[in-house]
Amino acid sequence: MKKIVRTLGLCALVMFAVVSCKKKEESAVMTFRASITQPTSDAKTYLGSDHYLYWNSGDAIKVYAIDENDTTSAVFTTQDNALKVANFSGNIAQSDNYYALYPAGMFSDFIDDETRITATVSPTQQFVPNGIATNAYLMAAKNVERSLEFKFQGLFGLLAIPMKGNVTIGSIELTDAWFDLWGDVPFKLNQLSWDDLKGGSDSRSDLKTITLECGDEGFTLSEEPDTAYFVLRPLACANGFTITVKDLAGDTLLTKSAPQNFSNAIKPQRILLMPEIEITANEP
């Protein structure tokens, strides 16, 4: 989503119609009609007041057409803006089997066969008070029973951290005690599942930290809490994690650690809400 995502919808229902009638093996111009359903949450909390994510102009999904002897892919985009239902247009081979991924730019084509691709997870995310950043949340879908309909499912979950205080923050770091949080991750397209979720002592320590960046001017907290959302792959946080809040100079304002607790494991399409944090500047 090109603009800031105001709210998060964790499932999407997509329908598309073939505009030009050609043989199944040939390419066809298609239009996807995408609607977004309300999210669900273990924490009984939502992003935003109306519970929806809005499609914005320039949003892109990657569509795969899979047949026995051939697999093709194409990017479909929308010109609609700030809508709950948007039309995505593109051109792809006709098939009984379609898969779709959002956002398009986060996924590679096949890496060693016609079932495995790579999702690239960034070590940084943009801090958006009470929301998530553009293109941070990954979703996937297969057409339902060879129909022209997609039902997207979220591949990630969210860790929500309410914060209040009287300081300006520059960044928020999440360091997992065991789990790799970013990097290139193999994904099984034909199963819509992660192929390898790495962690443990054999993994690089620098892969275990994701940073929410607050921009050049930072973000000033107030007496009313604002929530920071980390978009995380499943299983993260279960073995313990540390939150570090820094100012614009990179100095640490606050550090909070959570011990191992398997009830904290991140789940797809769920929001894990943590206790509120207060950060107050020292009096001179």
Image (cartoon, helix red, strand yellow):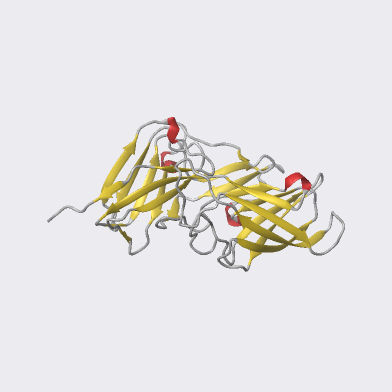
Can the viewer see residue 201? no
Number of numbered discs on residues: 0
Q: Is residue 198 left or right of residue 167?
A: right
Q: Is residue 113 left or right of residue 282?
A: right
Q: Residue furthest right?
A: 23
Residue toward you, 50 or 26: 50
**What x and y, as percent, mark residue 162?**
35, 49
Q: Is residue 139 visible?
A: yes
Please identify the residue farthest to the left as the structure is shown: 284
Q: Is residue 234 above or below residue 230?
A: above
Q: Position of residue 55 (x, y in %)?
A: 58, 61
Q: Position of residue 244 (x, y in %)?
A: 32, 46
**Image check: 262 left or right of 268?**
left
Q: Which quadrant of the figure has residue 171?
A: bottom left
Residue 216 lies, with reference to residue 120, above or below; the image says below
User: Quarter of the image containing the C terminus?
Assistant: bottom left
Vertical comparison of 239 with 29: above or below: above
Residue 2 falls in image quadrant: bottom right
Residue 239 in picture, x, y percent from top left: 42, 32
Residue at the location (56% across, 43% down)? Answer: 185
Q: Quadrant of the N terminus?
A: bottom right
Residue found at x 59% / y 55%: 103
Q: Nearer the viewer, residue 89 or 80?
A: 80
Q: Is residue 195 left or right of residue 99?
A: left
Q: Residue at x 46, y 53 (%)?
A: 47
